[in-house]
Amino acid sequence: MTPGVSQDGSWVLMVLLLLPLVGAGVVMALRANAKVAKQTALAFSLAELAMAACAWAKFDADGARLQQSFSFDWIPAFGVHISFAVDGIALLMIAAIAVLIPLVIGAGWVDKLPEGRTAGGFFALILLEQALTIGVFAATDVFLFYVLFEIMLIPMYFLIGSFGGANRQYAAVKFFLYSFLGGLIMLASVIACYVMAGDELGKGTFDWATLVQVVSDAPLSTQIWLFLGFFAAFAIKAPLVPLHTWLPDATAEAPIGVAVLLVGVLDKVGTFGFLRYLLPMFPDASKELAPLVLTMAIAGVVYGSILATGQTDMKRFVAYVSIAHFGFIALGIFSFSSQAMTGSVTYMLNHSIATGMLILVIGMVIARGGSTRIADYGGMSKLTPVLAGMLLIAGLSTLSLPGTNSFISEFLVLIGSFPNRPVFTIIATVGMVFAAIYVLWLYQRIMTGPLRGNALVGAAGGPGTMVDPEVGAKKAIFDLDGREKLVLAPLLLLIIGLGLYPKPVLDVVNPTVGATMCEAALVDPVPAERPLQCR
């Protein structure tokens, strides 16, 4: 067994990987009966959530670097294995997708699908995407990681291209080509790492732990080229400016539930890659090229914030907000302090929660008004006070208000980044100012002020009416129903719970961040209360 790897609880991870795959097959087989297919998809997603909770319970934060591992030979001649394990960061992302998938299924329960598409096919693709995404986070064979990194594009392509909006084909192709091209560039670096291992060890390998030891000792010039190959794929996926242009189109055309997964989970593969692959495998190149990455990150914070403020489309608004947030995450990672890095990792989780809730609430607004244009709304709080409250809470979490889950993450990023990167950190604070502007302005335009056009307030306890811009006819506007409240309740609890008590997440993240700092030979700029203990 590889040093720093524990196999205890490996069956849990194996079930986590297989359960959604089996679920996708079963749901697809039942697609002729929409109701049964939906119920089956929800049952599998809840079972997966239970297994994720089990994996969390079995994870020993003070134990081995990689835990719950298992491995099988795949292509022995080339040293390729089907090898999986989790660390604190991977566990956090697996938990995030396990929480979001049942909510996505619940939110899409009554969605109208394009002609010829079935609910069973839609939810089967959702479960397949879940399985592949978990595989990407848990893979410890670099070639296996690459394969899953590319394959995970396929179900997302069909989710956008088959179930999305009017321009869904354009958005799906753009998403696929950007990500696929980045993956091909990464493949060149993966192969180069394999060759280097063969020269050093006498036999090539794709084992992540072994490659960290071999490649991290390579000359700086070699590390830089290899770094750039991996970075291209991760910067597109994250995405960082100027490699971001696929995200607004994909988010705008994707169904609401798919947009939650796209922005809330899939994009985290990029920032996860920074932490798992770039820093430990190419420590010298990471330090050398950090100013480039930080420039892209800060450009994303400012650019994303400005464009979010000026957006007229709600779904594109979320995309640009996320671009700004990913800039904050990259800032924390490449500031090279344990505080900032911990902030970035927790930001990955908290962004999934806050933005996931924001997209779901926006979807509920769109379901009532029939339009994604912000200008088509106004005064909705008079008709839907509970929905208005949910939008406000999701927005406040998005702008990292103290007491919400995102605050501790943004605070740690800024306080940890300043000692090493004061100029970049000061510029990043511009994003905080803009966040208050774009979130509150969105809320004001949709929920406050006079009722839009021909909207009328209904009788007490009854619905109001609002003109549907698509057909020009009035439609009843109800507040949140029981299903919608049930979908939003877990995210609301997480926003408040993690805002008041983030310790359970920090306890899982801190040891992995410490291990990453040690692997990259990084030293905290300010002595920590608990200095890093490198093994």
Image (spheres, rainbow, N blue to C red):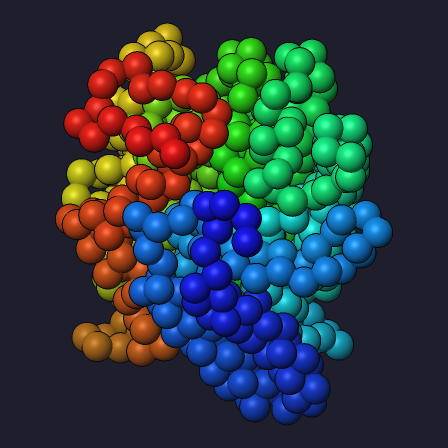
Q: Is residue 474 above or below residue 523?
A: below
Task: Depth check: give the residue in front, 520 or 174.
Answer: 520
Task: Depth check: give the residue in front, 434 or 494.
Answer: 494
For residue 10, side relative to residue 177 (left or right): left
Task: Depth check: give the residue in front, 116 or 31.
Answer: 31
Q: Residue at x 29, y 23 (%)?
A: 416
Q: Is residue 322 above or below residue 470?
A: above
Residue found at the very far top of the displayed protein? 423
Q: Residue at x 56, y 90 (%)?
A: 36
Q: Position of residue 347 (x, y in %)?
A: 36, 40
Q: Name the image quarter holding residue 8.
A: bottom left
Q: Position of residue 189 (x, y in %)?
A: 74, 31
Q: Is residue 122 above or below residue 504?
A: below
For residue 74, side relative to residue 339 (left or right): right
Residue found at the very far front of the displayed protein? 202
Q: How many marks?
A: 0
Q: Name the image quarter holding residue 380.
A: bottom left
Q: Position of residue 358 (x, y in %)?
A: 38, 52
Q: Residue at x 70, y 43 (%)?
A: 206
For residue 415, side relative to residue 519 (left or right): left
Residue 317 seen by the camera: no
Q: Residue at x 42, y 72 (%)?
A: 51
For residue 30, side relative to residue 508 (left or right): right
Q: Position of residue 39 (x, y in %)?
A: 51, 86
Residue 415 seen by the camera: yes
